[in-house]
Image (cartoon, grey):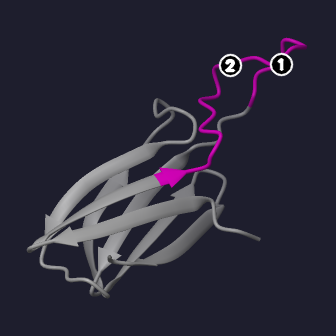
């Protein structure tokens, strides 16, 4: 199965800019379907970006984050050719992870 995470990391000098798009329904549990039944909560609880074995960004999320979230941030210390690992875990126990080479 293909990863739900699309990530791009570009290094310029000692700053690396990261952009990630995650395909996930991010259902809050408060929305109803066409039959009036509540759609159960299904959202990412933790999103982690790791470089060189250390977390550079950890986000603890809840049901208020929108569907297919987009994340953009920068950090110092990486260089071109290094790898960045991205992973998430949701409230149902599902997870996904991928790595991207820094360009």
**Placement of the C terminus among the 4 image quadrants:** bottom left
Is-magenta flag for residue 26?
yes
Q: Quadrant of residue 20?
A: bottom left
**Placement of the N terminus among the 4 image quadrants:** bottom right
Q: Establish if 91 lies above or below 28.
A: below
Q: Magenta part mainly helix, strand or loop?
A: loop
Query: What number is the disc on residue 66?
Result: none
| Marked residue nearer the N-terminal end (2 or 1) | 2
What residue do we see at 19% from left, 80% from top?
Answer: 78
Q: Start and end of the magenta stretch?
A: 21-39
| Residue identified by numbered label 2 | 31
Q: Quadrant of residue 80?
A: bottom left
What residue do we see at 31% from left, 87% from top?
Answer: 81
Q: Position of residue 36 (x, y in %)?
A: 84, 12
Q: Is residue 81 left or right of residue 6?
A: left
- Within 10 Å of the Cα at label 2, are there few (<14), some (14-19), or many (20+) other Cα atoms? few
Q: Is residue 94 left or right of residue 88?
A: right
- Within 10 Å of the Cα at label 1, are there few (<14), some (14-19), or many (20+) other Cα atoms? few
Q: Establish if 87 lies above or below 33.
A: below
Q: Secondary structure at mark 1?
A: loop
Q: Is residue 72 left or right of residue 31?
A: left
What residue do we see at 31% from left, 61% from top?
Answer: 18
Distance of mark 2 from mark 1, alpha carbons? 8 Å
Q: Secondary structure at mark 2?
A: loop
What residue do we see at 61% from left, 65% from top?
Answer: 95
Q: Position of residue 47 (x, y in %)?
A: 42, 58
Q: Position of residue 85 (x, y in %)?
A: 41, 76
Q: Position of residue 30 (x, y in %)?
A: 63, 20
Is-magenta flag for residue 87?
no
| Residue identified by numbered label 1 | 37
């Amino acid at each position: 199965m293909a990863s739900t995470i699309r990530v791009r990391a570009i290094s310029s000098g000692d700053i690396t800019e990261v952009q990630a798009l995650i395909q996930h329904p991010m259902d809050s549990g408060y929305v109803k379907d066409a039959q009036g039944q509540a759609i159960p909560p299904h959202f990412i609880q933790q999103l982690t970006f790791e470089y060189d074995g250390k977390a550079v960004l950890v986000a603890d999320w809840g049901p208020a984050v929108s569907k297919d979230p987009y994340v953009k941030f920068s950090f110092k210390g990486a260089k071109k050719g290094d790898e960045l690992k991205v992973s998430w875990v949701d409230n149902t126990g599902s997870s996904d992870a991928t790595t991207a080479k820094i360009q």
